[in-house]
Structure formats: structure tokens, C-alpha cells
């Protein structure tokens, strides 16, 4: 019988410090055993283990098209994330996954897609964006709204520069409050979403801190997006990742198996979802 | 149906132990629980509801998921003999079926195998359950509200009725039939004894308090989700979690590491949605920070959410939570209050 509680080992291949205050780091992990390699789709997550310290759930930030690595961006905030931040290149970590469901990329085919993200939750959105850019001809217009508290707290800054250069992608970057030298948008994500014009026949994916999601979804309704075309990713303090431990139970759903990706239509039926 | 004399009980248990690790209700200091027994002398058949439920046989309060060293990870070796549980009551037998829904697989998911809980499955799948009829139910028993009863056989492999001088066995499942077939020393029972069982059943049922119709509990709980009734229900709850720990159907757990350097283990431990820390995230964000939200979660999970997934309530009416609650928050009163609530 398969034992999904046992992590497999991966090696830390490369570490990127994302923010000058060092609270955000990205880890590229490489497989040690070929047979551990798994297929996944953007939006799925893994449990990241530091043996002796515990494990925490993180959305997979790499795209399925980046075959040899798994990428995770980790905000240093608790005991496990602290230990993850202490890792050095070459260290061994434990991974369980892929867990949960994914953004409905099949439904997006041939359609316009709007991606709205906030802060360091841009991880699975990066996975989605890179995946769609790698398969660019399969999708229509791609629009991205990405907000952070201040310019330092955007993750994947080098890639953002590359994305800005592309003419097959519209990128709106925004920060909460004005900062000297910032010549892009200023304002919270829900407000900026209201200001940017896009076609409400697009599909929409929202991921960010709970407060951002809560206030962005109604804005999308206001613009005219139907509930079943708005998707978001929820998070709880998931432990087992396979619908047993009960920590991520909301209504009759378990975020770890029925989610983390839900449509706004589904979310409206789940008590306590937002 | 066959019977064994009470004088032969020790011998029966001894024989059972040849092929099974036998668990049974025992008195352990002031508490009572299901434990692995050495001999029939350890068993206390007078205990109706053990203080701790037998879920711990399959899902112990703490369980090592694996040990690790610099050489890798290893799952602890399990006992080779399958488990036989003697003296389980209907409320507990039924709870195991419910837990098997949760730990067995995620029915709605593809790739079912990855959602099986091997720790539960290894112990539960081969076990043999002797379900003992309750001749004298307690004042806290309300199994009849949830389709159970002192003589209900649901979930048992072998159903056992205790009479003055004997134990009468009836095979219920295929596993139970196979077991009884190989049983050579027992006697067949007479019509007189069948009548006696009928009488015992009637008497037992008369002990139970009046049955509450809970058929509208599912829809009612859904209706009142946003109502102030929850503040009223939760007002005296101190969030101690005792109800969840003694509950035969509560199954939430925490996963925690114990270790230093390259050596240690990963353990799972019972947890409860009654605790504020249960949902508290590292960022400080807590989606269920209020006591009222947590009490609602427990009640809703039992009488609404589980029903939505598995078509039954996650409660067997064993009454343990009624007994242990330090502030006398009686779940039967909560259910009645919900059913009577007018918006």
C-alpha cells in the first residue's frame, strides 16, 4: 500500500534571496532519484519537510515545463520556514506531493486569462504564467495584475523584467503606497483591478493574502466576470495533505484534496471559505 | 447461532489469542479502556461504555509515522497477528465504519491508493469485531437517535449476547461466519434461548430514553449557520477538547517531529478543532479564532458536513461527551435546541 506520509528526498540546487530584508527566499530543488519525478499542473502544492522540525505546505512555484526542478518561495515566519531559510545549496530536504487540485488550464485553452496576485502568494501564479507562456499559442490574451506592499517585496524580480519586455503579455505592477522612484501603479490590488480595463469574458485567477482575495472577488463580479470563471486558491494549516487530519476542513470540503483551487461559484457555497 | 458457557470463556479467549492479538474492555485505575489483554482475567464485561473509545486500537493517541536516521526513513514494524476486539458495543462498532470512510480512501478522488491511510488500514482491515449487546444501556446513551440500538448488529463480525450463564454468538459478516464455522466445541442454541434474547432486547430498549427524530438535523444545521444560536450554544464551552478526545468518531490529528540532529521520528497525535491553535497559521492569521466558530465547526462537522460526504451523521450517540464535559454541555440538548430553533 502506498504510504503518502513518507516524504522523498530532494537536493537544494539553488537559493535566491528575493527581498533585501531576507524574509523571502526561493528554493530550486532537484530530484535525487529519477523515480520520484512526478507530473503536476499549476496550482498544486507539496508538503516541504525539514526532518526534526516538521513540514509545511507550499504551492509549487515552478511550471510543469521546468522538468528537472521544483521551485518553492518561502516567507520566513514560523519554526519550519525558519529552518527552510537556514538551508544551504546541496542540503537534502523532504517533499510530499503533488497534492491537491490545479487551475483549470484545460478550460483556459483558446481563451483570454487574467491573473491577479498579491505579495509572496505569486508562487502558483508564476507556475501558471510560465506554463501558459511556454505554451503561448494555446491561450488568448494574458493580463497580469501583481501587487506588493513595496517594490522590494515583489518576488521573481528578474523574471518580471523579462515579462515586461514581452509584447504578448500585459503586466500591471502595483504597490500599496507611493515610493520615490516608482513609476508604475500605486494602490491596493482590488482598487487597481477596478481601474484596469479588461474583457469580462476572460477567465480569471486570483491568489494572494486572504484579505486581498476577499476584497478582489466582489470587484470581479462588479466588472462582470461570472462566478464560474473566477478561480482562487485557498490556504489553511494543512498537515496530512490527503484529507485525513481535518485541519483544512471548511464546510464539507477539505482544502487539501477538494482544493486548494476553487471557483468563486464553489466558494460561495462553502461556509468560512473567505 | 451457537453458545459458549461462561465457564468456558477463559478457554475461548486463550484459543482466540493463538491467531489474534486480543483487545477488550479493562479497568485501568479509575479509567476504563480497550487494551490488549494477557488473559480473560483482564477483561471486565460489566463495562458498558469504556471511558476512552476503542478508536485508539486503530488510531492511537500518538503514533509514530516513521523514524529517520542519516540512512533514511523507516516505518515501524507492525504486529503480525491481526486484531480481535472482544466486547465492543454497537455505538463503537459503527464509529469504526465511519472512520474507515475517512481513513480508507478519499472517495471523490482519482488515484485512490494515495489517499489510503496505511496505518489505519493495516490494523482495521483484518480485525475481527465481537460486538457485545448492551443488556442495560446507560442514561447517557442515545444510540437510538442515530439508527443504532443496544442489540443492533451493524458493523459487527460476530454479535454476542450475554445471558445468565452463557455467551450466544451470531455470525454477521463473512469474516464472522468463517470464524464461527471453525468453532467446534460450541453448542447450538435452543428456541428457548432465542426467546430469552428477544426478552433481553426488549428490556434493553426500554432502558433507553425516548428517541429524538433527527431527520431534519442536516437541513436545520445548514439553515442556522449564520444565526446567533451558536453564541448561545458555545457560551459555556471552555474549549477543553475532552469531548473530541473521548469521541469514537472524532479523528483530527496533528503531525509533529521529535528529534535532534540526524535522528528522530515523525509522530501523529490526536488534536481537536476545539483548540484555537488548531487552525492558527504561522503568520498569525487564524480563520477560526473565536470559540463560537470552533463549537460550530464541531457540531457542523458531526451533523452536517460529514452527512454531505458520507450520508450519515458523524455521531453514534455513545454519550461519552455527555459524561466527560466539565461544564455539562450536553450534546443532546444542543441537538434539541437546533431542531427547535425558529429563525
Image (cartoon, coloured by chain):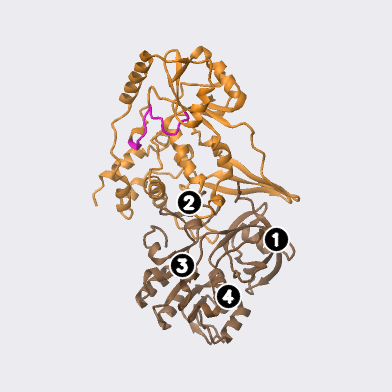
Part of the protein shown in magenta: B145-157
In-front residue for pair B79/A161: B79
Tell me the distance, in whole angstroms, between the alpha carbons under discs 1 and 4.
23 Å
Q: Residue at x 54, y 63 (%)?
A: A44
Where is residue A231 shown, x and y percent of the image? 44, 68
Considering the whole magenta stretch, tell me its main secondary structure: loop
| Residue receiving disc 2 | B276
A33 vs A222, nearest the viewer = A33
Q: Colour of chain A?
A: brown
Give a yes or no on whether discs 1 and 2 share a subunit: no
**Chain of the residue where label 1 is placed in the rendered structure:** A
Q: Between tags 1 and 4, which lies in front? A: 1
Discs 4 and 2 lie in a common subunit:
no
Secondary structure beneath disc 3? strand
Q: CA distance from mark 1 to mark 2?
A: 42 Å
Q: Nearer the viewer, mark 1 or mark 2?
A: 1
List x then y, in percent, for residue A158.
Answer: 63, 80
- Is B180 situated above or below B58? above
Residue at 46 percent of width and 48 percent of height: B273
Picture colour for chain B: orange
Disc sitting over residue A34 in the figure: 1
**CA distance separating discs 4 and 2:** 38 Å
Task: Pinpoint the chain carrying mark 2.
Answer: B
**Labels 1 and 4 share a subunit:** yes
Amino acid at each position: 500500500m502506498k504510504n503518502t506520509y513518507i516524504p522523498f528526498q530532494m537536493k537544494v540546487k539553488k537559493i535566491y534571496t528575493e527581498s533585501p530584508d531576507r524574509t523571502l527566499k526561493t528554493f530550486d530543488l532537484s530530484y535525487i532519484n529519477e523515480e520520484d519525478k512526478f507530473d503536476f499542473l499549476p496550482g498544486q502544492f507539496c508538503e516541504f519537510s525539514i526532518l526534526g522540525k516538521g513540514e509545511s505546505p507550499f504551492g509549487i512555484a515552478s511550471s510543469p515545463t521546468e522538468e528537472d526542478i521544483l521551485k518553492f518561495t518561502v516567507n520566513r515566519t514560523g519554526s519550519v520556514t525558519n529552518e527552510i531559510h537556514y538551508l544551504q545549496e546541496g542540503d537534502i530536504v523532504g517533499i510530499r506531493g503533488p497534492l491537491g487540485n490545479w487551475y483549470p488550464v484545460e478550460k483556459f485553452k483558446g481563451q483570454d486569462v487574467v491573473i491577479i496576485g498579491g505579495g509572496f502568494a505569486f508562487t502558483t501564479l508564476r507556475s501558471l504564467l510560465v506554463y501558459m507562456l511556454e505554451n503561448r499559442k494555446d491561450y488568448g490574451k494574458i493580463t497580469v495584475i501583481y501587487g506588493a506592499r513595496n517594490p522590494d517585496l515583489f518576488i521573481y524580480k528578474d523574471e518580471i523584467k523579462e515579462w515586461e519586455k514581452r509584447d504578448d503579455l500585459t503586466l500591471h505592477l502595483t504597490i500599496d503606497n507611493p515610493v520615490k522612484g516608482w513609476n508604475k501603479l500605486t494602490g491596493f490590488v482590488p482598487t487597481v483591478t477596478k481601474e484596469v480595463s479588461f474583457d469580462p469574458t476572460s477567465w480569471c485567477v486570483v491568489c494572494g493574502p486572504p484579505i486581498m482575495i476577499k476584497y478582489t472577488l466582489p470587484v470581479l463580479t462588479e466588472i462582470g466576470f461570472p462566478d464560474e470563471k473566477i478561480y482562487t486558491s485557498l490556504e489553511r494549516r494543512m498537515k496530512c495533505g490527503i484529507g485525513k487530519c481535518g485541519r483544512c476542513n471548511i464546510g464539507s470540503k477539505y482544502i487539501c484534496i477538494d482544493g486548494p483551487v476553487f471557483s468563486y461559484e464553489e466558494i460561495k457555497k462553502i461556509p468560512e471559505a473567505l | 447461532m451457537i453458545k459458549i458457557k461462561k465457564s468456558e470463556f477463559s478457554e475461548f479467549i486463550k484459543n482466540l489469542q493463538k491467531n489474534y492479538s486480543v483487545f477488550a474492555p479493562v479497568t485501568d485505575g479509575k479509567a476504563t479502556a480497550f487494551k490488549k489483554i494477557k488473559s480473560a482475567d483482564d477483561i471486565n464485561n460489566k463495562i458498558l461504555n469504556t471511558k476512552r473509545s476503542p478508536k485508539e486500537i486503530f488510531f492511537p493517541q500518538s503514533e509514530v509515522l516513521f523514524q529517520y536516521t542519516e540512512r533514511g526513513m523507516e516505518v515501524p514494524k507492525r504486529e503480525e497477528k491481526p486484531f480481535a476486539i472482544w466486547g465492543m458495543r454497537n455505538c463503537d462498532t459503527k464509529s469504526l465504519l465511519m472512520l474507515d470512510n475517512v481513513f480508507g480512501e478519499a472517495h471523490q478522488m482519482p488515484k485512490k491508493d494515495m489517499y489510503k491511510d496505511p496505518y489505519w488500514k493495516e490494523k482495521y482491515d483484518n480485525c475481527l469485531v465481537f460486538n457485545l449487546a448492551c443488556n442495560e444501556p446507560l442514561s447517557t446513551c442515545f444510540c437510538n437517535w442515530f439508527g443504532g440500538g443496544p442489540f443492533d448488529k451493524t458493523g459487527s463480525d460476530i454479535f454476542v449476547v450475554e445471558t445468565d450463564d452463557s455467551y450466544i454468538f451470531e455470525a454477521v459478516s463473512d469474516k464472522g461466519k468463517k470464524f464461527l464455522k471453525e468453532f467446534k466445541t460450541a453448542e447450538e442454541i435452543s428456541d428457548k434461548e432465542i426467546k430469552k434474547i428477544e426478552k433481553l432486547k426488549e428490556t434493553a430498549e426500554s432502558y433507553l430514553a425516548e428517541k429524538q427524530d433527527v431527520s431534519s438535523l442536516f437541513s436545520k444545521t445548514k439553515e442556522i449557520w449564520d444565526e446567533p444560536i451558536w453564541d448561545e450554544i458555545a457560551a459555556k464551552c471552555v474549549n477543553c477538547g475532552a469531548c473530541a478526545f473521548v469521541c469514537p468518531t472524532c479523528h483530527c490529528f496533528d503531525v509533529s517531529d521529535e528529534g535532534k540532529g540526524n535522528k528522530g521520528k515523525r509522530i501523529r497525535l490526536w488534536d481537536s478543532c476545539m483548540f484555537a491553535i488548531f487552525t492558527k497559521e504561522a503568520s498569525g492569521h487564524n480563520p477560526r479564532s473565536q470559540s463560537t466558530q470552533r463549537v460550530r465547526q464541531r457540531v457542523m462537522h458531526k451533523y452536517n458536513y460529514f452527512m454531505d460526504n458520507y450520508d450519515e451523521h458523524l455521531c453514534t450517540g455513545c454519550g461519552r461527551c455527555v459524561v466527560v464535559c466539565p461544564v455539562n454541555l450536553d450534546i443532546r440538548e444542543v441537538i434539541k435546541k437546533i431542531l427547535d430553533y425558529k429563525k
